[in-house]
Every structure is written in C-alpha cells, then in structure tokens.
Image: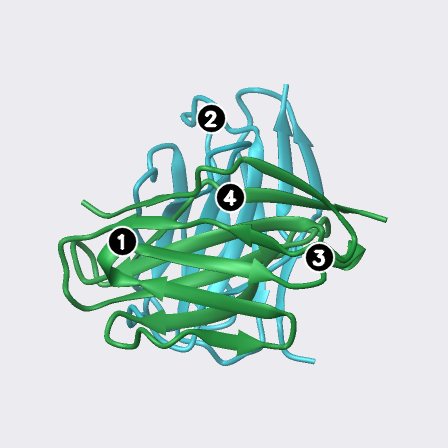
Amino acid sequence: AQKVTQAQTEISVVEKEDVTLDCVYETRDTTYYLFWYKQPPSGELVFLIRRNSFDEQNEISGRYSWNFQKSTSSFNFTITASQVVDSAVYFCALSDLSGSARQLTFGSGTQLTVLP
Amino acid sequence: DGGITQSPKYLFRKEGQNVTLSCEQNLNHDAMYWYRQDPGQGLRLIYYSQIVNDFQKGDIAEGYSVSREKKESFPLTVTSAQKNPTAFYLCASSTDSSYNSPLHFGNGTRLTVT
C-alpha cells in the first residue's frame, strides 16, 4: 500500500531563512506521480508541483525548488529566502495505479510559520 | 473566474441531524472529490465521481452519501450514522480522474456537530 510521511509536523523560521520540507513515500508501483500542495489559512489547497517517477530532474520555480530522489524515495521541497506569506500547511501527496482509478495519498502535512 | 465554490464556510448542527454540504465548480471538470481533513491527519478521501451519475466510495465513506446529477455539482450529505462528523470538508475537482491530474480545491466547509 502507498504511504506518504511528512515527519516535520511544525517548522518555524525567521523571514529570509531557507527552509526544507521533507517528504518520504512508499509505493510498489514503478509509475507514479508526486505532488506538493500549499494550504494557506484561507483553507483551500493550492497545487504547487507535479513530478512523475521517471523524471528525477530537480525543479526550480522562483524561490521554490524540489529535490526528487528515487534512491531514497524522497521528494523534498525547499523555500529560499522565506517570506511571511509562505506561512501555511504544506502537503506532499502520491498518486499511483494501485487500487481504484484515482488513489491519491496525502501526507499529514507540515505547518510552516515564517516570523517577521 | 473559474473555480470551486463550497458553501457554507461554517456549519453547525445538532447530533442526529443530516446535513448537506454544497460543492459547485465551473471549471468544466469531469471528476470531483470529497475529502475530510482532521488535525494532524492529512486528507482522507470520502467519495469521488468520475462522470455524471457515477460515484465511488473512498477510504472513509461510511456515514456519508453523495449525488452527481449535474457535471457542476457534487453535494455531500453527512448522515446521522457518521460517528464523528466534526471536521473540515474539502471538495476538489480535476479535468479527469487519471492519476496524474492535479486537483483543484474549494475553500472548504467547517462542520461542527454538537
């Protein structure tokens, strides 16, 4: 069965610090997708990135970067020069083909607080 | 602007009453989903629908019911059989139900049952 572990329940940093959110996953499938979502205080989850299992290139989008390593089953998310607006709960999720047509498993989330 | 609208934002009910949460989307998405979020537990899938007039149970469907009579609408009823209904409920949609489609979420409904 698939599983996503976000071991960091809460992280607190001071503005302008870099911060890395960890995500470790388990799946028996060789083909799968990994996602990161951001949940600001308003409540809705906002899609940040999708990565398929065959693409191990790291990705950078502005202050955000993602490090996908199949060897360690990890898909970590780094925010560079954090800002107060980055404060939110961040979820990592895994989607594979086991079970039903749509099986998306979420981690328990990491609450990031960026202090001014 | 296209998006997903959930209403109401906050809902209070007495134990033993059924309650229906609304979810409407104008993104022309085929697939819609209901998730439940509890503190420290991430999101758990209640029901999903791939097309109109079809829906499937998720991991925690007991005590819930849904309908999908229109493409735009996917209401969730929390019945009195749900033993612990107080939670934050999120509706989502995707272009299709393929496993690589990102989900688009509504703002959620916080249900409190006393």
User: Are the residues flagged by discs 2 and 1 from a single subunit?
Assistant: no
Front in this rendered view, residue B28 or A67: A67
Label 2: few (<14), some (14–19) or many (≥20) C-alpha neighbours in 10 Å: some
- Of the residues under marks 4 and 3, which one precedes in the sequence? 3
- Of the residues under marks 3 and 1, which one precedes in the sequence? 1
- Residue behind mark 4: A109
Front in this rendered view, residue A98 or B87: A98
Q: Is residue B51 visible?
A: no
- Residue behind mark 3: A86
User: Are the residues flagged by discs 4 and 2 from a single subunit?
Assistant: no
Q: CA distance from mark 2 to mark 1?
A: 44 Å
Numbered circle sitting on residue B42: none
Chain identifier, colour cyan = B
Q: CA distance from mark 4 to mark 1?
A: 19 Å
The chain containing the residue under callout 2 comes to B
Chain identifier, colour green = A
| C-beta proximity under 8 Å, tags 3 and 1 | no
**A83 over B80 or under it: above or below:** below
User: Mark 4: which amino acid?
Assistant: Gly
- Residue behind mark 1: A72
Which mark lies nearer to you, 2 or 1? 1
